[in-house]
Image: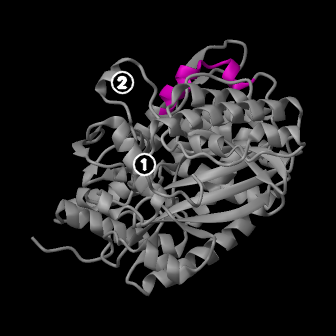
Amino acid sequence: MGEKIEAGGFDLSDRQRYRDKLRQCLTGLERLLADERFDRPKNLMGLEIELNLAGADGMPRMLNGEVLERIASRDFQTELAMFNLEVNIAPHRLGGRVFDRLAEELRTSLAYADRKAGEVDAGIVMIGILPTLERDDLVSSNLSEVDRYALLNEQIVAARGEEFTLDIEGVERLSCTAKSITPEAACTSVQLHLQVTPARFPAVWNAAQAVAAAQVAVGANAPFLFGHELWRESRPPLFLQSTDTRPPELQAQGVRPRTWFGERWISSAYELFDENLRYFPALLPICDEEDPLEVLDAGGVPKLAELVLHNGTVYRWNRPVYDVADGVPHLRVENRVLPAGPTVTDVLANAAFYYGVVRALAEEPRPVWTRMPFETAADNFDTACRYGIDARLQWPRRGRLGGLAEVDAVSLVRDELLPLAEAGLDAWGVEPADRDLYLGVIDERCRRRTNGASWQAATFHQGLEAGLSRDEALAATTRRYRELMQKGEPVHLWPVGLREPVPMG
């Protein structure tokens, strides 16, 4: 969304000018694509992880300003609420021992950030949704002290025109309302970036959409919100509802939500940017001074600032990204489906699985998206979010029979997707030691039917059985989670249950 956005009102002329600039930007993008001005293949990947701040008691700490001041590194930035941070890792070339190098960088950065957070009685927790969050934590007064967050909140609230309704029915049902978008801040995610050429973009995006359900099934890590056990990965329904600018009447008319899986396979990146303009009104109509078409006419490369800003307010689970580096434009697929955590090893196992399987699926002679309706991919995604490691998904049959078959997510991953991921990582030039270590983590999760969400739920229920109240069990689960997260063993090796004493009958 940009680093510098100043709060302030918008008038009618601002919105009309912004719409005109968006159309100019889209024309500029079309010309760049037609003229083949984009960067050559570099096999570059990027990684962002959103984090939580919690105290020794497991409760959230609204201290990101103080913690960031102590960290004093550009790698760490604010996120939406005061208990959030984000760490950004510089782009790496896919190949060699890239995942081991990333693991070392992340462990060093997170350990340093945790030490600095400790100076104000806080610590880093890498988890999809912090289990101890309460409704009173997610109010507008706890938004980070950055103008762009206040402005985004103001515009989404104004567009909706009434309170947000949170209604998620999973193991239990949560039903409540919110006066701001702050509940979105409960969703802490991992974003995986892959730079691709325009020619490869549609195949990579389609492959990422097709495999999103499998990613969530093996990586789910967000089963709790406001003391309720909901979906195994509760971030997607929470994100959708907490940013939904549509009152019930617009929902009934079929108006698309800003948090969106999509509705069709694509044949070019342009289609996604075009959809974003056609379907979604501007939330932040802030115009840049650049005239993108004049820049193009002069032989330059436009920033397309309005297009980039608007694109950042449409929350696709696989988002198209336009950017300029060293004066050369490029496209990225930003994969946003994964929760943070549980450990650095788990995050990088999820990343290795994604980069490997997307490469292989994108290069298949009969691509999966030609054998599966888009609606099936969207339904699979919801099913995986709801049931996690126990999900059953629809997937194209192998061989000449064709059609779809229902299959356990763990069987699909072990029998079909992991071999593809192995081939994909080989194609990227990743060394076998890295490939086998991180894909082996995914295989073990499937074999044991264990991921972050299943561990959290099982540990919470053991706490209840031992006599803890719900709030005590959630706090104890969070403390134990952080302890095991810091030890660093992947989650499939974590012992279920609490080490700390519980009250006697």
Left or right, 118 with respect to 226, comes to: right
Residue range in magenta is 367-381
The amino acid sitting under disc 2 is Gln
In percent of width and height, residue 194 lies at 73, 47
Quadrant of the rendering where the C terminus is positioned: bottom left
Q: Nearer the viewer, residue 225 or 284?
A: 284
What residue is shown at x 31% (from left), y 52% (from top)?
225
What residue is shown at x 60% (from left), y 55% (from top)?
2
What residue is shown at x 67% (from left), y 18% (from top)?
371
Give SS at disc 2: helix
Left or right, 77 with respect to 125, comes to: right
On the image, numbered disc 2 is attached to which residue? 251
The amino acid sitting under disc 1 is Gly
On the image, numbered disc 1 is attached to which residue? 9
What residue is shown at x 63% (from left), y 77% (from top)?
108
In percent of width and height, residue 130 lies at 37, 60
